[in-house]
Image: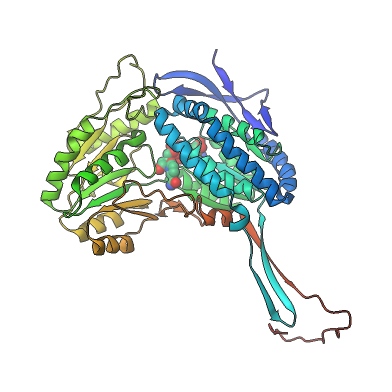
Amino acid sequence: MSSLIEHFIAGTTYSEPRTRTGAVHNPSTGEEIARCAYGSFATVDHAVMVAKEAGRRWGRASHAARQAVIYKLRELMIANLDTLAEAIGREHGKTIPDAKGELGRAIEGIEFACNAPHVAKGEYANNVGGDIEVFSMRRPIGVVGCITPFNFPIMVPAVMMTMAVAVGNAIVWKPSEKVPSAALEFARLWKEAGLPDGVFNVVQGDKEVVDAILEHPGIAGVSFVGSTTVGEYIYQKGTSHNKRVAAFTGGKNHMVVLPDADLEAAASAFVSAGFGSSSQRCMAVSLLLPVGHETAERLRDLIIPKIQALKVGPYNDASADFGAVVSRESRTSVERAISRCIEEGGELVIDGREIEIPGHPNGFYLGPTLFDRVTTDMHLYKEEVFGPVRGIMRPTSFEEAIEITNMHEYGNGSVIFTRDGKSAHRFMMEVESGMIGVNVPVPLPSAYFNFGGLRRSKFGEGHLYGPDAARFYTKIKTVSQRWPEPDDRALPISLAFNPSA
Ligand code: NAD
């Protein structure tokens, strides 16, 4: 019988007598390896009550006390790298080195959260008028509801929640039901790091739990990372329930290559940023835009052998470049995208549909697939395909390449390869994406810069990490104060609205 993956509330696993469950698979083998408990409004209500109580005390703890926990969490993440990578790989399908890469980024986010006392401090001005001084302070918002996607089971939650906790909030987190085990591992590390019970809670489940988080009056803010359709729903529903919401959503990232670029470097960057993690990254490069016929032909000749050399395999095969996609449904949907692009006139250059992985006949595998001559009216241009299918478009000029990049509904990351500083500058000024790369494969900023897309890649204000994250998780109070000397005259009555009184 499959084991049951439970919730984690008040510092311990939490189970309910009657509960819905869902299957959890190992994508590398296709087997069901566990069941995941699905919570309800009652589960969320219980978690919020616990979080509120624990959060009230945690919000009053000193910065030093909070920082000690975050420092310890960092140490524990490093000490438990193998266990965490295994939990990620087994349920997500990404290779162990890729999982460790994700954990490295998570640790960066945790390190940045150690700066919380600095990035979340207020402002001060004296002599504002007649011995009056004014200062502002940033206070925790309360209980934060976090809803995360399957594709980064630890990195996204870590960068999102560590800052929220570091500035004094408590958490109710709904992880993706496809990768629930890593959430429990992470919760246990928080406890071991010394976080008081009840500050960090996990409610497993599906839409029912999401809706409960969005509707619950005890939740002050919601952080979401996931697809655009769901993110837009979460933003609209969450704000209608008077919560602050930041939703980081889908991407379709373009890589423009100018004729003067180092084409060998651009080709390698496209293959690694395009197919890493079976292309299940919001910052993956989806579309290659070489400018002009000659650049396109040369680049195509360079990338084809690199793509054909990629090895697909189970998450624990040390020689595999990437693994299976996360679910059978996901593979079917990517296969559908391939068929549709063929129907719409795309040129199928490499077809990954018939891939077979020895010893793993039922795994959710898809080989790398490449289309050429993709145009803006095709679905492969319009829609995010969360699987290893990439396309080449053929703009005839730099202007057209910028126009194609900007007419897309998403604006997560965009990249240019060129040796010309003027063109690179124009690209970074004119392209409407939240993150821009120049001669780098994935423009994922370091944790001390803000992360977030533009257009329909983000809903709401705030960023996922960087200084803006600390601002999102705090509310401002501004104090005006005056301390008269004992023999000062009482202020005269004045009904004027005079700022320098
Ligand atoms: P998803 O939107 O399907 O799921 C995200 C979360 O929402 C999960 O916890 C899921 O249980 C929940 N959910 C799913 N359907 C829901 C519904 N109808 N109502 C309420 N909640 C629902 O996303 P996913 O497939 O887990 O992740 C992939 C997506 O996430 C891609 O679109 C990717 O681009 C995006 N993503 C974005 C970023 C970013 O920073 N912009 C980062 C990582 C992933």
Which of the two residues, 264 or 2, is positioned nearer the viewer here? 264
Q: How is the image coloured?
A: rainbow
- Figure check: 430 above or below 235: below
Q: Residue 209 location in percent, x, y?
A: 58, 37
Hey, which residue is sitting farthest right in the picture? Answer: 487
| Residue 157 visible in rendering | yes
| Residue 156 visible in rendering | no
- Figure check: 311 above or below 431: above
Q: Residue 117 location in percent, x, y?
A: 63, 55
The part of the image, by quadrant, that contains residue 48 is top right
Q: Quadrant of the N terminus?
A: top right
Q: Quadrant of the C terminus?
A: bottom right
For residue 239, side relative to residue 496 (left or right): left
Which residue does the image show at 65% across and 53% down from the upper left?
141
Which of the two residues, 258 or 148, is positioned nearer the viewer here? 258
- Figure check: 477 above or below 25: below
Q: Residue 64 location in percent, x, y?
A: 68, 49
* Total labels drawn: 0
